[in-house]
Amino acid sequence: MSEPKNVFQQTRQHIKTGNLSFLTKQVAGWQKLTKLIQPLLPQPEIWQVVCYEYGVLTITGENQAMISQLGYLQKQYISQLSQINELHDLHKIQVRLRAKAHKETQFDHKTTKQLTPATQEMLQHAASFVSDPKLSQALLRLASNKK
């Protein structure tokens, strides 16, 4: 086996220009690897390469079952992936759980719907039966449906 090559090692040029160009090159390399490995790994997961260094490929996924499957069948996937020229020295796959990307939702008062009078009445009625004063106040505020 050949000596592992660190394809993301900083060069003298990167030291002069700062780490931005180095990091940009790293990310571009990982994105390229992601596109290459995606069709070969368990589907329908969206895999993402986060590091490839010294023959160790670190990828993330959002589905724990798919991550477990990849872990159990690692040897088979290594033999498949190592046929890709960029991953010829691959000997280990590390898989990590990635937090699901939550789209930030902004609460927009203009899009909220007005409660019907019947719903408001039911909430007010429920507030009168609740013994917890904070919960009762919350129900009354909800019933008022102030914009």
Image (spheres, rainbow, N blue to C red):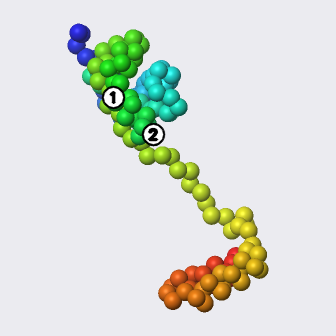
Q: Amino acid at mark 2?
A: Asn
Relative to residue 139, is residue 3 depicted above or below? Answer: above
In this rendering, does residue 14 appear at all?
no
Query: Would you say 83 lies left or right of 10 here?
Result: right
Query: Would you say 136 lies left or right of 50 here?
Result: right
x then y, percent, for residue 36: 48, 20
x then y, percent, for residue 121: 71, 83
Nearer to the camera, 37 or 8: 37
Which residue ends up furthest to the right in the rendered image?
117
x then y, percent, for residue 98: 42, 42
Nearer to the camera, 124 or 147: 124
User: How busy is the neighbourhood of tag 1: few (under 14 within 10 Å), some, or many (20 plus)?
Assistant: few
Q: Residue at x 25, y 17 (%)?
A: 4
Tell me the element at label 1: helix
Q: Which residue is mark 2?
A: 63
Quadrant including the N terminus: top left
Nearer to the camera, 137 or 23: 137
Nearer to the camera, 71 or 22: 71
Which label belongs to residue 72?
1
Q: Residue at x 52, y 50 (%)?
A: 102
Q: Residue at x 65, y 86 (%)?
A: 125
Quadrant including the C terminus: bottom right
Q: Amino acid at mark 1?
A: Tyr
Q: Are marks 1 and 2 in contact (CB under 8 Å)?
A: no
- Of badges 1 and 2, the one in the foreground is 1
x then y, percent, for residue 92: 29, 24
